[in-house]
Amino acid sequence: QVHLVASGGGSVPSGGSLRLSCTASGYRDIDYYQAWFREAPGKQREGIAAIDKEGRTTHSDSLGARFIISQDNAENSFYLQMNNLEPDDTAVYYCAAGAKPRGFMSRAPSLSPQSIRHWGQGIPVTVSS
């Protein structure tokens, strides 16, 4: 059974940084990639960044270089470093495991929620002005 447990959320002033962590279990032998999403009040869930087992990454163009995904395969964990946070970054953040279409395993991982197969619990991040 797949489990994704996120941690590291909280409150931070504008301009601050946070590092979210997600510990994954139950899919060592399944070729999932790992991703972070967020959902702000009144908005749709938004893909932030994704990384596959080979280290290929996809980052949201709209968030620029402020949000960086990384992973530690030995620890079955992946991370989201968030820098220069703004009040608009206030949201519930989700870690997730996704699947690529068959025959497209060399493609960079997708930020589409439709590609996600498992979600972790959401953790709140609040950025104050």
Image (cartoon, rainbow, N blue to C red):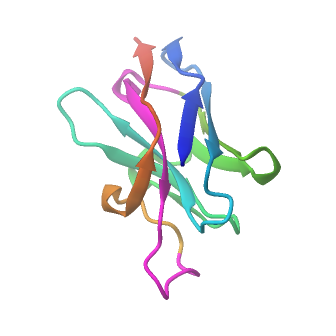
Range drawn in magenta: 85-107
Name the residue located 69 percent from the left edge and 64 percent from the top edge.
55
* 11 on left or right of 81: left
Residue 44 vertical placement versus 8 (above, below): below
Name the residue located 40 percent from the left edge and 57 percent from the top edge.
116
Residue that extends furthest to the left in the rendered view of this protein: 42
Q: Nearer the viewer, residue 120 or 16?
A: 120
Asked if the stretch drawn in magenta spans residue 105, the answer is yes
Residue that extends furthest to the right in the rendered view of this protein: 74
Image quarter of residue 51:
bottom right
* 99 on left or right of 7: left
Looking at the picture, how far across and down is residue 95, in whole percent? Answer: 50, 41
Name the residue located 50 percent from the left edge and 26 percent from the top edge.
85
Looking at the picture, how far across and down is residue 60, in whole percent? Answer: 44, 54
Q: Nearer the viewer, residue 94 or 15?
A: 94
Looking at the picture, how far across and down is residue 14, in whole percent? Answer: 48, 17
Name the residue located 56 percent from the left edge and 31 percent from the top edge.
6
The answer to whether residue 45 shows anywhere in this view is yes
The answer to whether residue 66 shows anywhere in this view is no
Looking at the picture, how far across and down is residue 62, in whole percent? Answer: 39, 50
Residue 80 vertical placement versus 7 (above, below): below
